[in-house]
Amino acid sequence: MTPSSRKSIPRRRQVSARELALQVLHDAESRGAYADRLLETRLRASTLPPRDAALVTTLVMGTLRYRALLDHHLDSFLGARHDGFAGLPLWIRTALRLGAYQMLVLTRIPASAAVAESVELAKRYGHPGTAGLVNAVLRRLASGERAPLPDREKETAAYLAIATSHPRWLVDRWLARYGAEEAERLLAADNEDPAVTVRPNQIRLKRTPLGAALRSEGHTSKPGPHGGPVWQVEGGYVPSRSPLFRQGLLWLQDEAESVVPLLVNPSGGTRVLDLCAAPGGKAAAMASAVSPGGLVVALERHTSRARALQENLRDRLRLPGVAVVCGDGLAPPLRGTFDAVLVDAPCSGLGTLRRRADARWRKAASIVAEMAALQRALLAAAAGCLRPGGILVYSVCSFEPEETDETVKDFLDSHTDFAQDDARPYVPPAFRGADRALRAFPHTHGTDGVFAVRLRRG
């Protein structure tokens, strides 16, 4: 059996944090799977203590974020041997990346331990020759040897693409808009570990404060730092292991994302359409607010995601007043109109790169224009679902002009019966833009990058 064909290494035995991280990284790349979903599944099945579970998350996400920097050094050390770093079996490339990440970025781990553990993984998932190669390369890093980077002043874009580990097209885009200093801050923020933030199920968690409930599970928590309706959880929180999560007493939600439903401002009896509802965090927040007597229709195009949405909102969270409908937001299969419509539109997701560590390597420069065209079509469809005087909220987890201000301007130019409301009275001060919009950025708020506006139909 060759190293590259070892697809089913036994997982029933308990593996170490580093070995589990290796398996997740390998499977994410070989299968094209999303690393965060694989990570959650594997951690749920493991019996690792919280501290080790947290280390697995750090190793997986950090190795993915810094892939360009790690590969730059590793490829330089390998040179023409084995056709360079890319010519090695995936298991061995992954073991090298894990070891390099621990020495180049996660410097709290002794270099000797990073080398030794990586060599042991190379032995288990490769053969003595590849284990020797891993040992030789990582020892060079442990000794302090580094491959030179492009000149920071003369080749700024090339330098940042490697040093902050982002696709070159994205570095060029942000340098052109923000300038070198702010672009570097934004790129660096993408490489920070995001806070784990949860939102309480207000319908079902009434008597016990969320902080006390989390403390009973052994987790330290505190309110969101910017006034959003979430709590930050520390201590290696794995949602699928948490009784509070499994019982539907809370759900995961970024603090900036949690503010978006506040722009809808739903209240008891309100009829709301969530046009692009999956995975359901915003629909859940609005369902909590419209009860009693109101209704949130959560629309989702894909059958499997609609089924998962139903299981989340109705079966796990057990929220009243929610109807999940499988249908296309471009042609909603609905009758009548609504008091409010939320278009939390599919987007480039460039505001979520630190939370979705592998997303930066999946996206091409064309995604921004492609998503902007879809967003304009979704807004046009949403307009027909809104009653006169109703509120249309548009949001994206992006701060690209094509997906934010230009999309809104295009909509208002072509829908003269709509006008932009001031969103600022509905959101915490930290998220109030100077132009009546909600704006959040990773490098200024420590949250996802989020844009949202509130539009009123005349």
Image (cartoon, rainbow, N blue to C red):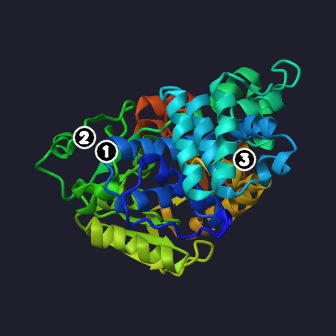
Label 3 sits on residue:
406
- Nearer to the camera, 106 or 334: 106
Residue drawn at (73%, 53%) of the image = 410
Q: Is residue 31 left or right of residue 428?
A: right
Q: Position of residue 73 (x, y in %)?
A: 74, 34
Q: Position of residue 387 (x, y in %)?
A: 48, 66
Q: Quadrant location of the C terminus? A: bottom right
Q: Residue furthest left?
A: 207
Q: Which quadrant of the structure image shows residue 449?
A: top right
Q: Mark number for residue 50?
A: 1
Measured in 3D between alpha carbons, the distance from the residue under mark 1 to the one under mark 3, in whole angstroms, is 44 Å
Asked if disc 1 and disc 2 are in contact, CB closer than 8 Å, the reply is: no
Label 2 sits on residue:
219
Measured in 3D between alpha carbons, the distance from the residue under mark 2 to the one under mark 3, in whole angstroms, is 43 Å
Residue drawn at (18%, 53%) of the image = 205
Q: Check disc 2 and give the amino acid type.
A: His
Asked if disc 1 and disc 3 are in contact, CB closer than 8 Å, the reply is: no
Q: Foreground mark, 1 or 2?
A: 1
Q: Residue furthest top?
A: 153
Q: Foreground mark, 2 or 3?
A: 2
Q: Secondary structure at mark 1?
A: helix
Q: Secondary structure at mark 3?
A: helix
Asked if disc 2 and disc 3 are in contact, CB closer than 8 Å, the reply is: no
Q: Residue furthest front?
A: 128
- Vertical position of residue 257 compared to residue 108: above or below: below
Q: Position of residue 301 (x, y in %)?
A: 55, 75
Q: Earlier in the sequence, mark 1 or mark 3?
A: 1
